[in-house]
Amino acid sequence: MTRRGIILGLPIILAFGLAFQPGVALSQEKPLKEQIVGSWTLVSAVDTHPDGNKTNPWGASPKGAYMFGADGRFTQMAIPH
């Protein structure tokens, strides 16, 4: 096998190896409630009104953070910018 054949073949072998790993359940995702637990950085805050009009209540580039707990509680910190 040529060097080029090896280089092109390795990603294919790796992909098959990862796809057929035992115990991998690709179709089972966590519920949204579990996916958002943790800290998040605010990068955009756009409100879309029923008529389609959009507004930026915190300005064009807001600064802030959100923290979501596993118990359903959350906190928001936002600074208009």
Image: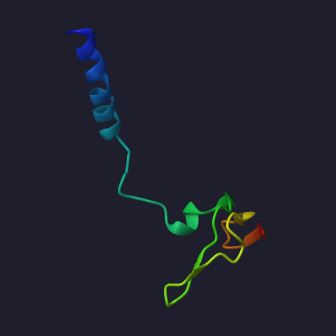
Please identify the quarter of the rendering in which residue 14 is found.
top left
Query: Taking 5 as reference, is 40 left or right?
Result: right
At which x and y percent is residue 35? 55, 61
Residue beneath the point at 75% across and 70% down: 76
Please identify the quarter of the rendering in which residue 66 is found.
bottom right
At which x and y percent is residue 44? 63, 66
Furthest residue toward left: 1
At which x and y percent is residue 41? 69, 58
Query: Taking 58 as reference, is 12 left or right?
Result: left
Q: Which of 15 and 21 is in front in this view?
A: 15
Q: In which quarter of the image is the N terminus?
A: top left
Q: In which quarter of the image is the C terminus?
A: bottom right
- In the displayed structure, would residue 77 be above or below residue 27? below
Q: Which of 73 and 60 is in front in this view?
A: 60
- In the displayed structure, would residue 1 be above or below residue 75? above
- In the displayed structure, would residue 81 be above or below residue 27? below
Residue beneath the point at 59% across and 63% down: 36
